[in-house]
Amino acid sequence: MNVERFPSGKLAVNAILLHIAMIAFNTLRMIGQTALQFSENLPYRHKGKRKRLRKVIDDLIRVSCKLVYHARKFRLKLWCHDPWYAVFRSTYLAL
């Protein structure tokens, strides 16, 4: 999350940034925990039983997509052949 150093010398600003980082971290963790429930759709298989939450979150953040503006609307188009597409879609529908 890169909040090891605070950008401001004022404590009130640093407190606000710390709360924003906390909300972002907790949201990403909830998404990652939900994605781990769909372990049969995860694209990588290995002998270990544990799948790292950080790795799952990183892979979900990096799902290939593009932002399209058409008919006065913005749409997010996902590439359906992405190996993480099934997990991303299942997680999105679960939330």
Image (cartoon, rainbow, N blue to C red):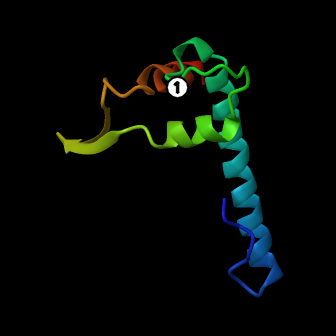
Q: Residue furthest bottom?
A: 9
Q: Considering only vertical position in the picture, is 74 above or below 91?
A: below
Judge from the rendering whether residue 12 lies leftward or rightward of residue 62; answer left or right.
right
Q: Position of residue 79 (x, y in %)?
A: 30, 30
Q: Quadrant of residue 76?
A: top left
Q: Considering only vertical position in the picture, is 74 above or below 7?
A: above
Q: Considering only vertical position in the picture, is 70 above or below 32?
A: below
Judge from the rendering whether residue 32 lies leftward or rightward of residue 83; answer left or right.
right
Q: Quadrant of residue 36?
A: top right
Judge from the rendering whether residue 60 lies leftward or rightward of residue 37; answer left or right.
left
Q: Position of residue 69 (x, y in %)?
A: 22, 45
Residue at horizontal 70%, vertical 58%? Answer: 21
Q: Residues within 10 Å of mark 1 (few under 14, many from 20)?
A: few
Q: Position of residue 30 (x, y in %)?
A: 70, 34
How many labels, in total? 1
State the quadrant of the N terminus.
bottom right
Q: Residue furthest front?
A: 47
Q: Quadrant of residue 51?
A: top right
Q: Position of residue 26 (x, y in %)?
A: 73, 44
- Please, what secondary structure does the residue beneath circle 1 have? helix
State the quadrant of the C terminus.
top right
In the image, 84 versus 49, the foreground residue is 49
Residue at horizontal 51%, vertical 42%? Answer: 61
Q: Considering only vertical position in the picture, is 83 above or below 39?
A: below
Three-letter amino acid code of the residue under disc 1: Tyr
Q: Residue furthest top?
A: 40
The residue indicated by pointer 1 is 92
